[in-house]
Amino acid sequence: MTLHQLRHVIRVASTGSINKAAKLLGISQPTLTDSIKKLERELGITIFERQPSGVHLTQEGTEFLDYARDIIRRTNQVENLYRQRKWLKESSVNGKMTFFTRLHISVLKELQQNGRYIMKREYLERKNDMLTDYYATLYEWFTKQARKHISIPKDCKYPIWLMPNMDSYQKPVKDTVVLELEIPIGNYLITNHNCWCYRMNYFYIPLNDEDEQAHQKELERFHIDSEDSLTTTDKGNFYPLLRQKITASWDRVFTIPPETPEDTQGSCWEIKKEWMVRALLYDRNEE
């Protein structure tokens, strides 16, 4: 039994859907299903019943969920306390915060020539291809809302995503470079990555597990299988109060603080040459 498996159970229980839980966890549906089945076999219990209307907790599952939530809550408390202390101690120096970001290699030339880099539509197209419109719409919304919390230059339309530490997936890949930056306070925004995942999927951002369960029951009461259709299609016209509730919750991207460094994402809208500490280039020998 692992903490990942416990978190998987909690997420499926709160959403009532393997598919929706997998999207929010950032893993595939088969991976999530396999994780839970392995846990059930290991413990000799059945946590969920699979039905056409979704997945539902068994009596054993309800009991197990209480234990899982308590373990994760206590684990998060300990991790949050000590990792936040360590992160803040190491990252914030002389009014600056250390971040890492992975960008196209052309960023180095632009910084050298202009002393400044901003994200442009063409860069999104280069990275996201056919999904450019999807991401551009989300990023424009994020920037518009972020202006309520931070001063952003008028010529900046899209955020540059930052990480507080250099995880393995942030290593340079072909045609990219990872920049280590020291960004002065007031030039970056810290938000909750988990909340952003809900927003990217056009889901309601809950205040807690209980709020998420209540929202899921509301969707079931109206027989709504695809929550995103309430805000991305005309279906929302038939449920205006529910649609309003969902869109209003999206502001929580900026108001619910991250619980751990892993939940933390940073964003800025420009990179200045003097903020760069070092550039980590792609090395084919590390593949």
Image (tube, rainbow, N blue to C red):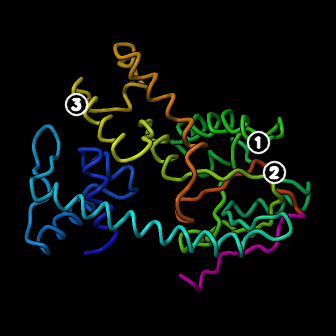
Amino acid carrying label 2: it is Gly
Asked if residue 187 is positioned above or below residue 248 in the image, the reply reads: below
Image quarter where the N terminus lies is bottom left
Is 90 or 271 nearer to us in this picture?
90
Q: Of marks 3 and 2, which one's residue comes earlier in the chain? A: 2
Give SS at disc 2.
Answer: loop
Amino acid carrying label 3: it is Glu
> How packed is label 2: few (under 14 Cα within 10 Å), some, or many (20 or more)?
few
Asked if residue 223 is positioned above or below residue 197 in the image, the reply reads: above
Q: Of marks 2 and 1, which one's residue comes earlier in the chain? A: 1
Q: Tell me if label 2 and label 1 are in contact, CB under 8 Å.
A: yes
Q: x, y percentage for residue 117?
A: 81, 53
What residue did someone put label 1 on?
A: 150
Is 94 or 282 nearer to us in this picture?
94
What residue did someone put label 2 on?
A: 186
Q: x, y percentage for residue 185?
A: 81, 56
Q: How many angstroms separate mark 3 from mark 1 (CA)?
A: 38 Å
Which span of residues is magenta-colored?
274-287
The disc placed on residue 220 is 3
The disc placed on residue 123 is none
Q: How many angstroms separate mark 2 from mark 1 (CA)?
A: 7 Å
What's the residue at 36%, 65% (across, down)? 72
Q: x, y percentage for residue 284?
A: 60, 81
